[in-house]
Amino acid sequence: MTDATEASGGTSVTKRFLYVNRKAPYGTVYAIEVLEMILIAAMFEQDVHVAFLDDGVYQLRKGQTPAVLEMKDFSKTYRALEDYGVEKIYLEKESMEERGLTADDLVIPAAVLERKDMISLMDSMDVVLSA
Amino acid sequence: MKYAIVVNEGPFNHQASDSAYHFVKHALAKGHEVLRVFFYYDGVHNGNKHSAPQSDDRNIVKRWSQLAETNQIDLTICVAAGLRRGIVDDILAPGFRISGLGQLIEACIDANRTVVFGD
Amino acid sequence: MLHLVNKSPFERNTLDACLKRAAPGSAILLYEDGVYAALSGTSVADKVAKATNAFDVYVLGPDLSARGFEPAALIEGVQTVDYDRFVDLTVEKRGVQSWL
């Protein structure tokens, strides 16, 4: 965190935001509502990072067909993140491996981070919004 | 310190709203500033004036309203999450207002610390 | 970072999730149902005792006593704090991460 952040706390400051996704989609609402939060945050020109860990990696799995449950398919919205300037999207390698997921299973190309790098990434954040 | 507080769950179902309330009270008592308490996901239900718990139990909604009044705290209910759950202006308890997610982000930018209470 | 864990380790995996990703030197506060992880004599007690070597592990006193436990029941190395100290911990650490 910069000294400017501590001193002024003003809106001209750029902070490192991290959105942490640990939950699978559809069983709970968190995945879709945190995505809405990320899209709004993108407009504030902050340093936005999005991490998918544990069951959160399932949110990016391609081939979702929630219409059969009369639910909205929001997996396509992840493709819009880049258009909104949100490019720092990370999946944790160990979480993917535990669940048998590979890069080919994902709806967007995203950086796969080893846990040791996820540890340092998380520790560097100013604001962590967990869903 | 300036705080942004986020409450992800509704009253009674989870302890989140209770924990957030006690945290805010103690932070204020220590002379810190709470810029905003933002209610998202099911947290929007904390603003429902029709909540009527039994008289020998804590009244979570009223307690937030009283805290807001005494300390001029901004209690913001997310408009989108609120609409989904039927929390609209005419059922808001005193001290609560409805606004957009931008208010959450602004609070996190302006605050020194953001603390999330959820499930 | 101050990490917050509010679920029982027997119900959810958020304690494990936190322990895997917290950087050394972090503080971890067990509160709400998370206090059960702080008790000695459970199947997770060894894991939490080990964690006190890498992290400062705290338990929120009011949540502990609400559930019928006293500080004597805690794993050695876990420190009891009240809400005032909870607030202080958020000041002392650069940020707060909730494990939900």
Image (cartoon, coloured by chain):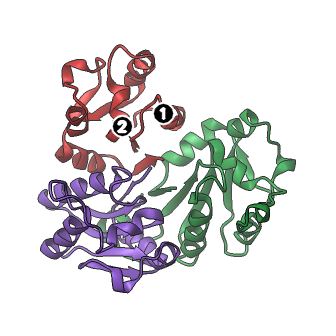
Chain colours: A green, B purple, C red
The circle drawn on residue C11 is 1
Q: What residue type is disc 1 on?
A: Glu
Q: Residue furthest front?
A: B54
Residue C52 shown left or right of residue A72 in the figure: left
| Residue identified by numbered label 2 | C33
- The reply to whether residue A90 is visible in this rendering is yes
Residue, x 21% and y 72% (percent of image)?
B65
Q: Callout 2: few (<14), some (14-19), or many (20+) C-alpha neighbours within 10 Å?
A: some
Q: What residue type is disc 2 on?
A: Asp
Which is nearer the eye, C7 or A49? Answer: C7
On what subunit does the disc labeled 2 rest? C
Could you say which quadrant of the image residue B92 lies in?
Answer: bottom left
Residue, x 23% and y 67% (percent of image)?
B64
- The reply to whether residue C28 is visible in this rendering is no
On what subunit does the disc labeled 1 rest? C
Q: Position of residue A47 (x, y in %)?
A: 55, 65
Residue C92 shown left or right of residue A120 in the figure: left
Residue, x 73% and y 46% (percent of image)?
A112
Q: Position of residue C1 (x, y in %)?
A: 40, 44
Contact? badges 2 and 1 (CB < 8 Å): yes
Could you say which quadrant of the image residue B10 lies in?
Answer: bottom left
The circle drawn on residue B43 is none
| SS for callout 1 | loop
